[in-house]
Each structure stands twice: as C-alpha cells, then as structure tokens.
Amino acid sequence: MYHKEKSIQIKNSASALYNNLSVLRIAPRRLTHFTVVHANMVNMVSASWDGLNYTHRQLQSKEPNVATSTSLIMQAAFCVLPSRDLLVVTSQKGIQMYESDGSIMVYWHALDTPETPTAQAVFARGIAAVYENYICVGVSSGAILVFDVPSKGSNITLSEVLEEHKESITDMASECSGSQECIANLVTADDGGNLCVWKSGEEFQLLNKIPGFDMSCSSVKLWKGTAVAGYGTGQIRLYEAVTGILHAEINAHARWIYSVDIAPFSGLLLSAAEDSLVRVWHMTITPETNSVEVAHLHNECVTDTQICGARFCDGDGYAFAVTGYDLSEIIRYIQS
Amino acid sequence: MSSRTLPLLFINLGGEMLYILDQRLRAQNIPADKAKKVMNDIITTMFNKKFLEELFKPQELYSKKALRTVFDRLAHASIMRLNQASMDKLYDLMTMAFKYQVLLCPRPKDILLVSFNHMDAIKDFVKDTPSILSQVDETYRQLIEMYTPLSSGEFQLIRQTLLIFFQDMHIRVSIFLKDKVQNSNGRFVLPTSGPVPHGTQVPGLIRYHSKELLSLRPRQRRVSVHMYQIEALISRPDELSYGVINIQATKDQQANAELAKIMGEFTESGDQSPSVSNKGDDLLAMMDGL
C-alpha cells in the first residue's frame, strides 16, 4: 500500500518525546516544512516537492533571564489558522511562537518557574490551533493557556487559562476550520488518560470530561466529532467527544504509543509506538447513525527504532513521515 | 524535564560500575581482603549520607561532564587506581549498559525494578559490613518512598529525560556485539517479538461497543451497551508468540517483604525486566575485549 521513499537527513537526532514530528504543507510554494525536536533545539527542514531542494534551520529554546542553564523543548508544532500559520515551540521555560518558516519569533510567554526546582516538573506541552483565532497550549500543572492571535503582527495575548485537568497535559487537537457547524472543536489529554472536550469562544466552554484509567494518553486527534486517543498501553480508543461514549478500542501496539495522526479527507489513521511499528488504519465514522468502523490496512517496521513521531504529509494520507529516537533522518512513505 | 531523574541515573550507573570493578578485581587476582576493602570504600562513598541528601533533592540532571567527574572521583575513592584509558572504558561500559536497560524496559516503571536489581547486587557486596549495609538499606527505603507513588506517565517523563541524556551514544561494547543485542553501527537491537508488558494487550483485536444491537434482543433492554468483538484482519507476524519470563527473585531476605509488596503491584505473568546478574564472566570478557 505504501513504499519507502528517500529519507530526509536532519542535523540532529530526534529526542524521545511524544508527537515529535510536525508537518506543514505549503501548496503555493510547492514545499513542505518538517520540524523535529532534539533536546533544546528544533530542527526544521523545508523540502521542495520536486525533491531537489532542502533548506535547514535550527531554532534554540529561549532563555530570557538565565544565560547558562539548558531549557529542554517538549514539543514543536505548526498551527494553521484561517489568517496565518505559526510555529509554536514549548519548553521548560515557556512558549515561543514563530512565523511558520522559523524566521522570526513573534511571541514569548514565560512559565512561572520556581526559584528552586520542585518535585513536580514545570514545562509546556500540547499545542493546538483552534477556530477561529486561538492557539491553545498545555502546561505540566494541567492548566491550558488560550492565546488570542490577531491575523497579523505580534500582538498575541493570553486570553484565558482553563483549569480542568489535574495532571500534566500531554497533547491536544482540534477540528472545524469553520467550514462546518461543530459542537466540539477542541480535545485535550493528560497524563492520567483523562480527556476534556471544549467549544472555543471568548470563553471556552467545557462540554465533557472523559475519564482515563490512570494510563497516560500520549496523543489525541479529533475528527468528525470523534476523539481518537493513543495510550501508553498501546491501545487506541475512539470516543464520541461530546457524549463520551466509547465507540471502539483497538489493541494497536505492543508498547507505548507516541503519535496518532488522521488524514481528514480520507479517514486514514496513523499510529506509531515504541514497538518500532507504524500502522495505518481506515476509519468510517457516520455521526448520524452513531456507527464507527475501523479497518487495519498497513504496517511499516522501522528496525531497531523506537518511533516518536508520525504524521501524514497531506490531507488525503497519500504520504506520511516518521521520526525515531536517536535517528537523524525523517523517513518517508508514499502510497504505491 | 523530570526533576527526579538524578538518583536513578546515579544509582544505576554506580551499580554497573561496581559490577565491572568487582570482576576486574577478581580477574587480576587481587587478594580477597584488599578487593573487599576497595569495594567497601567505594560503596561507602557512593552512599554517603550528605551526598545522597543532595542527590535526592528535586533538580535537573547534571551535565555529562559533571556526572563523569562524579564517577571519576567515585572510582578513586579507594586505594585502587585507574589510568585515563581504563577510566574512559569503564565509563563507556557503564553508560552503554544502562542505556540498554532504559531503552529496552517494556514499561517505564520497569526502570525502578532495574534500579532494585542494582541495589540488590550492591547489598550483596557489603553484606558482611553492617555499617555500610545500613546506609544502603536506608537508600533503598528512600527509593521506594520516592518512586513507588509515581504514575506511569511520570515514569515515562523520567525515562524520556534519561534518553535525552544518553542521546547519540553509540559506543560499541564487545559483549553486546557478541550477544547480538547491539549492531555493528552501535545501535541496540529492539526485538519485535516476545511478551507484551503488564497492562498491554497483544495487538490484534478491535472491539466495538454498540447500542444498536439492543433492538435485536428485546430481553437485553436492561443492558445499556451491548458489546461484541471482531477479530481484526491484522496479519500477525509469526514471531508474536507468547512466552513468560518471570522477574528474577531477590536472594536477599531483608528486602523480600518490601519487594514482594511492590513486585505484587508490577508483576503479572509475562513481565520481563532486563536481567543484570550473571554478568561476571561476560563483563570480564567485555573489559578484555575493548
């Protein structure tokens, strides 16, 4: 179904972090940006579609006050809003937002880090662009910061802090670019496997809380009102977001899942885990009849590698890319 | 990242170091009493009360250079002397061994079991010296107190912090190469077969929960959700066969009670934790081979 394509070499190896790959497709310029986190640095590669040009860029985590101590980056993700695209980088010290080509930093938000370290780690993790002009970022305390993003410029402001989760945020996802009427458009996940479902607005509204089973949810996506969540047990669960009804459980992997992704136009689901496997599934979701079906389509094994990032490169799922711990390349697969 | 990583890093690396030194002392036919003194002196320094107090405080990991200095000092805490080349080899071995253990843990919480294995071995080295033994026991207690309440997500953060520390280290170790757990490019072999960890199901099943079947079975109306299972059409590779490997039981009577309670929480048939005993002869060959 898929075959391996030429890999893209990156300047550093990928760190073992959840969702450690972000992809932004820029059709007008016929190129795709990829970002991979290595310790305190983000490796960015822009690949032209003809395969001839690769531009590299490295972004460091920001240290506004302390000159020497390192600040490890937890996640880097592209945020696509109707008016603009931004690259958001979250670390132990705070949140940086760049123009999507990584050229200029447009915003910095510092986290409240205590003078002496506490037993509870402090960091930001979990990034989502939410309709219409919000970027949400999770924090290790369980709080979710909602930033209001103007269509141009750097006048980004913190609009709200949502305090519902009690454990560290792991990932979050949104859907609804405004083209359809949606009840819920944001789902957030934490280390205890709990999911919160929200509706965006001047004041975000909590629609539902889906309890976890004390098993970390490391990656989550939202599609057709269904929350698709990957867990440390290797299981993927599909919940109807607004009601919390469990539609399906997939015993997908033999180890901790690090990434799930969905190709929204085709309903393809991508899952990747520490067990060296990337799996492709197909979901058929009919919200009207409440029916959900999942079919397993394809596997790829990346030998001797614990996979930490996997993303579709386009909305149809025609191609996908994979990163692994200690691997200095982005492996690509395209449909045969 | 996790501010609770340093004690585990230090104790596990220290444990590996002691295994290697113990074998080296025997290989060179150092008289038993001298060898014992060397081991006791190093372990006493390693478990120095004030040092451990500092270590257990929440903090970021030391830099690679700083940690190497700590172990340089530790290795020279006795009358034993190592030249630079030997110290380099020792440190490479220690770090690659622990990297291997961290990478291959089926679940992040298993890192704690690996740490207990190292602690057991250390206790065995000093079992005839009550004063040092009590220091070690106290540390054991602190480890249990600090780490058993942590969730699996918090352990995964610790594991991720350790993996960042070990990132890009691909030093080839002859015993790992010989046993085919490491490739010639220095990367470890990750098996894709074997038992799944406790809490994980063997991949293959897709289970649907549907309300629709209620209409077909009127007597089941009291049941709010009807469940049926569908075996997914996943072609399962032949290697995904069942096997059971039990966690090696501790030989030390003293820790049994505590460990039995903790292991009861972690252990179910099918658990696997990388074994670190019986490395004696292998380590010897390893040192010779480098």
Image: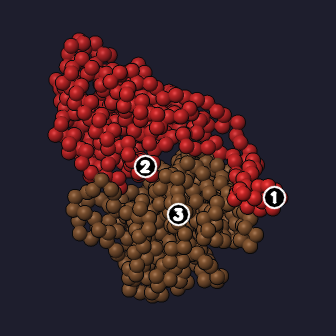
Residue type, mark 2 in image: Ser
Residue lying farthest to the right in this orientation? B216
N-terminal-most mark, 1 or 2: 2
Q: Which mark is residue A195?
A: 3
Query: Compared with residue A67, is residue A250 higher up or lower down, i.e. above or below?
Result: above
Q: Is residue B152 left or right of residue A112?
A: right
Q: Which mark is residue B151?
A: 2
Tell me the quarter of the image containing the N terminus of chain B: bottom left
Chain under label 3? A
Residue type, mark 3 in image: Leu
Q: Which residue is mark 1?
A: B218
Q: CA distance from mark 2 to mark 3?
A: 17 Å
- The answer to the question of whether label 1 and label 2 lie on touching residues, with beta carbons closer than 8 A, is no
- Taking the image as drawn, is residue B273 in sight? yes
Q: CA distance from mark 3 to mark 1?
A: 34 Å
Q: Nearer the viewer, mark 3 or mark 1?
A: 1
Q: Residue at x 64, y 63 (%)?
A: A245
Image colour assigned to chain B? red
- Taking the image as drawn, is residue B92 in sight? no
Residue type, mark 1 in image: Pro
Query: Compared with residue B135, is residue B237 higher up or lower down, i.e. above or below?
Result: below
Chain under label 1? B
x%, y% of residue A242? 60, 71
Image colour assigned to chain A? brown
Crowd band around label 2 with a 10 angstrom C-alpha radius: few (<14), some (14–19), many (20+)? some
x%, y% of residue B6? 30, 45
Crowd band around label 3 with a 10 angstrom C-alpha radius: few (<14), some (14–19), many (20+)? many
Q: Residue at x 66, y 71 (%)?
A: A224
